[in-house]
Amino acid sequence: MTIRTPVADPPNESTGGPVPHALRLIGDTPMVSLERLFPPPGPRFFGKMEKLNPGGSIKDRTALSMLTDALGSGRIVPGRTTVVESSSGNLGIAMAQICNFHGVSFRCVTDPKITSMNLALMRAYGADVEVIDRPDEATGEYLPVRIRRVNELIASLPDSWWSNQYANPANARAHHRTMEEILTAIPGLTHLFLATGSCGTLRGCAEGLRRAGRQDVTVIAVDSCASRIFGEPLQRAARVIPGHGAALRPPLMSNDSADWLVRVDDADCVVGCHEMLRKESLLVGGSSGAVLTAALRFAPRLPESARCALILPDGGERYLDTIYDRSWVRRHIGPLPEPSRWAGPSCSYPPIHLTDHEEAAA
């Protein structure tokens, strides 16, 4: 008896057919309505599920853009060049994935805040990972030390290249497409909520809105209280949840990229993640919990006609032993606020209108 094996149809992306390789799966992530967290009637909120990129986060877009740009210009030569980057997790995974695809060596400098899962994933993709063990004496943060170490590696490794997510314009350009996808999915978009870190997503989405002639969309940046992106930190305690905020103001940061700022702390991120799981059955990462917190705090300012997009950068699978582990949360963060109080009008960090804030500072 002869068993015939079906032959797959030729790749046809327009009909949902096979794609030629894994990197073509990056982007075009779906959006989900968050009606259990924001029940009608009233403003509508939609989450962009960046965890569904093949590398598990929005940083797939960043890494693809930076590496494609460098490969196209000849700055990276497979089999010869070593790519070096500083990352607390997601970008390192994305860079390792794409470098592995192209046969390029990758070395990542990280710090003890990286989760065990993120570290294992980078190494599984073939990355050489170096963990900095001491923070910067002046700031208590690891990022300045990581950057110093990257510069040492670039000076010592022959034919090495620093992708420099904090200043590389290709990081921001990646999110022109992110913004196009959101505007296509929500033609009546009025508000955009997104976390800040390298500021590539913030800058790129703001540029994407201008390119589309959609300056009417209000951009709400979400930052950590212990971050220096928007000035001096409100908290001196070190951040324990990676993925949002920064110890240094990134060169990609532009003052005209956001209209509003909402600051959150680590406890806010954790409660936001737990509430997203409890209400929507979505397992998301720390920066997604931060974005949800900001949206809930900002919601009372919105008209009923508002249509809001929340960029949810990654999933929670990589944080099962941190954010979703009660003993870890007790040790590293302490008691959490009740969900009914965490995002209400009595919160410690109300939204700031950046234009008013800058005028007052001047």
Image (cartoon, rainbow, N blue to C red):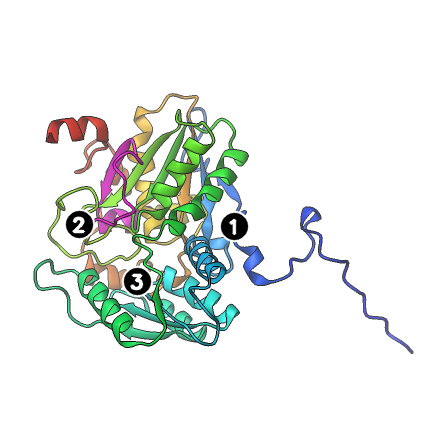
Q: Mark 2: give few (<14), some (14-19) or many (20+) Cα within 10 Å.
A: many
Front residue of this view, candidates 39 and 91:
91
Q: Mark 3: give few (<14), some (14-19) or many (20+) Cα within 10 Å.
A: many
Membership of 259 in magenta stretch: yes
Q: Secondary structure at mark 2?
A: loop
Look at mark 3 in the image and give the residue it sits on. 88
Q: Which residues are magenta?
A: 249-272
Q: Residue farthest to the bottom?
A: 1
Question: Left of 138 or right of it: where is 351?
Answer: right
The CA span between labels 3 and 1 is 22 Å
Q: Look at label 2 and name its amino acid.
A: Ala
Q: Look at label 3 and name its amino acid.
A: Ser
Q: Tell me which residue sits at (28%, 57%) in the image.
A: 242
- Mark whose residue sits in front, 1 or 2: 1
Q: Secondary structure at mark 3?
A: loop
Look at mark 1 in the image and give the residue it sits on. 27
Pointers 2 and 3 in contact (CB under 8 A)?
A: no
- Residue 24, horizontal then vertical, whole percent: 57, 56
The CA span between labels 1 and 2 is 30 Å
Residue 226: which disc?
Answer: 2
- Residue 6, horizontal then vertical, whole percent: 81, 66
